[in-house]
Image: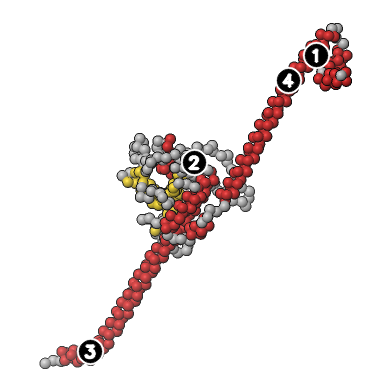
Amino acid sequence: MEGHDAAYLKESVGPALSQALTAMVTEQPTDSVDYLGRYLLAYVKREEGREARELKFKKAQEVAEAYEKAQQDKLAKEAEEAKLADMPVDGEETLVAKLGEEVEVTSLFPEFLELVKAGTTATSTYIGVKTGAVSGRTVISFVSGSEGSDMTGKGLVGGNPDDEEDKPEGVSFGAFKELEVPEEEEPAEPEEPAEGEEAAEKAPKGPQFLEQLVVENVVRDSTVKFFGVPKLGAYAAVPIRYQSCLHSEGVAVPEVPPEDGSQFVPGYQTREMLLGLHTMGQGGRQFSEQELAFARRLAALLGQALERSEKALWDDEVARRSGAKEAEDSLAAAVAEAKAAAEAKQGEEEGKLSEELLPETKDLEAKKARPF
């Protein structure tokens, strides 16, 4: 038992007594018992504080490790989603090829919308065209929708530009709003270019617009216009802008003929459309950033395809007009040449006739000259 008791005392109070006795030898206190008691009390407080700090540190370390793991999981998930987003959706490569070749791009709208619907898992997708003013108001006309969509033929009317209180229907017009860019301080004067170098031109600043308009919960937004029964879900409108030359002033005659000798030049106007998509009926599901990025990418491709195809149609029309003008000029030249030839021939015939009549004319004049 004595060995067991000694082991117990050594394990339980040995470190504390050892430190206390060592301190007593160093300090040589007058009241050794009081010093020992106070030292042991202080030792207990120090140990409790150390244990508390160790426990707190341990918890903090566990929280840090959990946070780091969560971040790693998040990054891994985002990397996987980005990888999936970069992978073409079934049918994407085929459609992209068609967008690069097809002249009648509007015929691809249904296929385009089904691809966007598949790539974003949207409930419905549709295309709206922003058209000219009706009684001073712009209009968004929905011209095509994915399978099951009832948006085709519907539209939204914009607000009266002369009445600030007259608001547009729905939220989609906000996708076309130009952003207010704060004025920047005047930059410092650029350094003079070295001899033989040209000064760098300052790039002009153009207008800036939203990449997309997103309503996370359409039911809670009172400005959303519903064409059916409202349901939980999100709505996104992705603007599509391209330079159009198919309009009443699209074929212009240049004041200064270009170097290539072209008779006509394209007159471009910015045309605005939108790609709309929503998740209504999916329990309030939000669009992920990858899904929105996919929609933006497809919308940009559609805008490029429309601009390319319209320029191709413009080229065909200009070629037709140029051919017609050349044919008209050729015909006019041929008529002038034929007229000149006819006049020359007529002159020759008149000369011959005069020569044939000349002897008779001389005899007649001689007879007239004879005295009676």
User: To which residue does mark 4 refer?
Assistant: 49
Residue at 53% x, 57% y is 93
The answer to whether mark 1 and mark 2 are in CB contact below 8 A is: no
User: To which residue does mark 3 refer?
Assistant: 357
Q: Is residue 208 visible?
A: no
- Name the residue nearer the viewer: 358 or 340: 340
Q: Residue 192 vs residue 217: left or right?
A: right
**Circle 2 sits in a helix, a strand or a loop, which is it?**
loop
Q: CA distance from mark 2 to mark 4?
A: 49 Å
**Circle 3 sits in a helix, a strand or a loop, which is it?**
helix
Q: Around disc 2, counting alpha carbons within 10 Å, would you say few (fewer than 14), some (14 to 19), or many (20 or more)?
A: some
- Name the residue nearer the viewer: 126 or 123: 123
Of labels 3 and 4, earlier in sequence is 4
- Name the residue nearer the viewer: 134 or 334: 134
User: To which residue does mark 2 refer?
Assistant: 285
Q: Position of residue 2 (x, y in %)?
A: 88, 18
The answer to which quarter of the image holds residue 312 is bottom left
Amino acid at the residue labelled 4 = Gly
Q: Position of residue 161 (x, y in %)?
A: 35, 40
Q: Residue 269 vs residue 22: left or right?
A: left
Q: Quadrant of the C terminus?
A: bottom left
Residue at 43% x, 41% y is 174
Closer mark to the observer between disc 3 and disc 1? 1
User: To which residue does mark 1 refer?
Assistant: 39
Q: CA distance from mark 4 to mark 1?
A: 15 Å
Of labels 1 and 2, earlier in sequence is 1
